[in-house]
Amino acid sequence: MNAVARILDWPAELSDENPSALWDAVAIARAVKGTANAEFTVSGVEIDSRDVQPGDLFFALKGESMDGHRFVEMAFAKGAAAVVVDRPVDGPHILVKDTTEALEKLGAAARQRARGPIIGVTGSVGKTGVKESIFAALDRSSRGDAHRSVKSYNNHVGVPLSLARMPSRARFGIFEMGMNHAGEIAALTRQVRPHVAVITTIAPAHIEMLGSEEAIADAKAEIFQGLEEGGTAVIPADSPHFLRLRDAAVACGAKVVSFGKAADADVRLLDTVSAIGGGSLVTVDMGDRRVCYTVAAPGEHWVMNSLAVMAAVRAVKGDLGAAGVALAEMGGLPGRGARVEIDVPGGEADDEGQRKALLIDESYNANPASMRATLAQLGRTPARRRIAVLGAMKELGSHGPDYHAALAEPIREAGVDYAVLVGEEMAPLAKALDEGELGKSEGAKLGKTVAFAHCASVGEAVDALRAFGLERDDAILVKGSNSVGLASLVTALSKQEG
């Protein structure tokens, strides 16, 4: 079987699977400096009793308002093989002084035994999608021997948990790191100790806590502090903070690989054209070769993300062909660009008697840069009408009113027919749309009026959409900060009957 056939022949057959245990009692007790009361093996690690699967190791973590020891019995009832606790319990367990510290120690032990290259990913926008794409590429080429942090497990608990879940046989590990304050990524990267550190982009997310984009760039650049000797820093060449990121990487002894449209980018975008199905056909110059591949997820931001993926895969000597196939197969993730057809009540039915509209689910997160990117993509999406349900952007501090009002321009440029604005922070945008402004910059021209509703809650937003009346061939973008709760609106729209 040649290389191309091996890449396309996926998933692996059952004979490839290695069902070996993740940890045994002796290894866990040694790693966390605890005492085991029985012999056992575990096949997974969990911190939420509701998610426990048979064979898992459950950590009874203690927080300010919650004590995981209350759920030990539930964990055993759901099939946990053992638990990690700070007091004796009935059933197989590891006794430690502090369960949170024990989780960190088990994560450190997993990192210590890792036999393959580790990739760390951070950035203001796109880090989860880039992490998932790198994983898909390396998992395909290694036939199932890649590991990554799931969902957005990227904080002081999620990172050690994701490390602790990494099998000893994993040939690659990919971990996401996030932050709200300076110093947080520095702590996480020293746990992950990546061989390759990727920064997707710098944007004014969390600017309320950090004060400026320069400070955000510095906080993201902390990821380089944990790089293994001889490691690689993958950074955006087109960012206005490129030199700042490059200097931080060099100061940590990293080899710098840049990606973007810039003429001197190491992974340089040469050309992109629309592909059948809404994605993009991309041609990239990687210095010694040119690579052409398809990106299934639509939007220029995904084209740029793909360059970071290619740079990271090459840095760990991964298979670029497998990366191209992975990018061609990956659609949007739930809450991060997933596109699904939903039944709607209005409009004429098609030849099969159906009324379908397109729902674009971007409900997990939002900041000024990602809002503009997804609105631009909505504008390029074929539709009879374009509807934008936009939730407030959080953690913008005193900059918030201006950033929200400035969305009036991309809303008009996208040809939005109806906008539903959710949250009190959206008041400046409602005012800008109501007055026909394009924002508050000097020389801004008046634009056409966009019909909109300003809602205080998700429930009101659902009612506003029902009153507006969704019809066949509409395109509905749903995007906002996760705390706004627009995921429940996506669920409501997905379940409605035509």
Image (tube, helix red, strand yellow):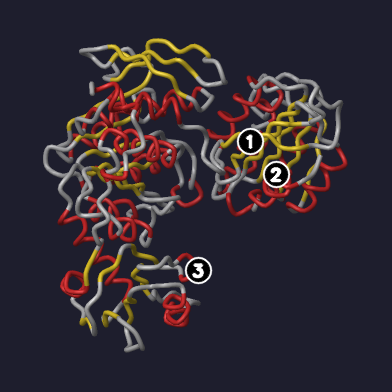
Which image quadrant: the C terminus? Answer: top right
Q: CA distance from mark 2 to mark 3?
A: 24 Å
Say what secondary structure mark 1 lies in: strand
Q: CA distance from mark 3 to mark 1?
A: 28 Å
372 lies left or right of 472: left
Say what secondary structure mark 2 lies in: helix
Q: Which residue is mark 1?
A: 340
Residue at the limit of the structure toward the front, as seen here? 15
Dot 2 or dot 3: first in sequence order is: 3
Residue type for callout 2? Ser
Tell me the number on the disc at residue 27.
none
Residue 389 x, y percent position in the rendering: 71, 39
Which image quadrant: the N terminus? Answer: top left
Tell me the number on the disc at residue 494.
2
Residue 391 x, y percent position in the rendering: 66, 45
Residue type for callout 1? Val
Give the residue drawn at x 30%, y 54%. Answer: 188
Q: Circles 2 and 3: CB distance less than 8 Å?
A: no
Give the residue drawn at x 39%, y 18%. Answer: 293
Label 2 neighbour load within 10 Å: few <14, some 14-19, many 20+: some
Residue 346 x, y percent position in the rendering: 86, 33
Q: Circles 1 and 2: CB distance less than 8 Å?
A: yes
Residue type for callout 3? Arg
